[in-house]
Image (cartoon, rainbow, N blue to C red):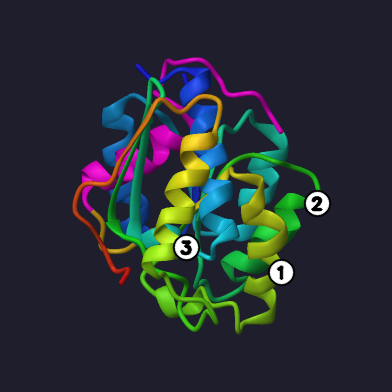
Amino acid sequence: MITDNNLNQSRAVRRILVKHNIDLGRLRMRCDNGKVKLSGALTCLYQSSKTVTQQTATEIITEIKKLPETTAVYTADLSGWH
Amino acid sequence: MKTILAIDDEPMMLHCLQTTLEKEGYRLHITSDPDEGISLLQKEDIDLIMLDVKMPEKNGFELYAEIRKFSQTPVLFVTAYPKALTPSSPIFKEIWEKGFSDGVTDIIYKPFTIDALQEKVSQLIGLPDGPTPEKQ
């Protein structure tokens, strides 16, 4: 069941991803009762001046973990960063 | 029941979106005319707008900018051209910085799976009969 909290959390996660220029079309994201699941490709937009390094990926996950609604972040099969 | 407005110049894509999402329980308005889409948005209670990027008369970015002047309804861009979504395009850069940072704008690339479509839609507006998210 998707609740208001899930939707608020998914908005907040999207804001973090956009801040890091992440291509939302290549990433799958699901927020469910505080758990955030990311899969697909964690890459920047085409011709973005930024690239996704291990440090960027860590920063993104840390920021998602800091959201008040977040209880856990799962990153199954997340590709595209190096 | 949540209502979705899909604007795309490809009738087959509109049919596919309508069939898939109505089966899920959403109500769909579909149109290939951007101006009719704006008019529907002003008349109807729409929960999500699905916008094609490449359309002949008015592209999805121009339409998005027009919509954001009067509505904060969540938007899902649907495109087969990921390269159109680049910060080196001035219009997209502006939309990305001002629009996407609202957290209620997302992207799905064609071709997509039904699973991926359902996930994008439900993460933006919830399930068809679930609570309506607060308007921003």
Q: CA distance from mark 1 to mark 2?
A: 14 Å
Residue B55 in percent (x, y) is at 52, 71
Q: Which residue is mark 1?
A: B94
The boundaries of the magenta stretch are B113-136
User: Are discs 1 and 2 less than 8 Å apart at CB?
Assistant: no
Q: Residue at x 27, y 39 (%)?
A: B20
User: What is the crowding at mark 2: few (fewer than 14 residues within 10 Å), some, or many (at least 20)?
Assistant: few
User: First in sequence: mark 1 or mark 2?
Assistant: 2
In this view, the residue in front, A38 or B98, is A38
Give the quarter of the image for residue B134: top right
Q: Nearer the viewer, mark 2 or mark 3?
A: 3
Residue B81 in percent (x, y) is at 40, 75
Q: CA distance from mark 1 to mark 3?
A: 16 Å
Tag 1 subunit: B
Q: Is residue B107 above or below residue A13?
A: below
User: What is the crowding at mark 3: few (fewer than 14 residues within 10 Å), some, or many (at least 20)?
Assistant: many
Tell me if residue B130 is in the magenta stretch: yes
Residue B69 is labelled as: 2
Q: Residue at x 52, y 47 (%)?
A: A14
Residue A46 in percent (x, y) is at 45, 79
Identify the secondary structure beneath mark 2: loop
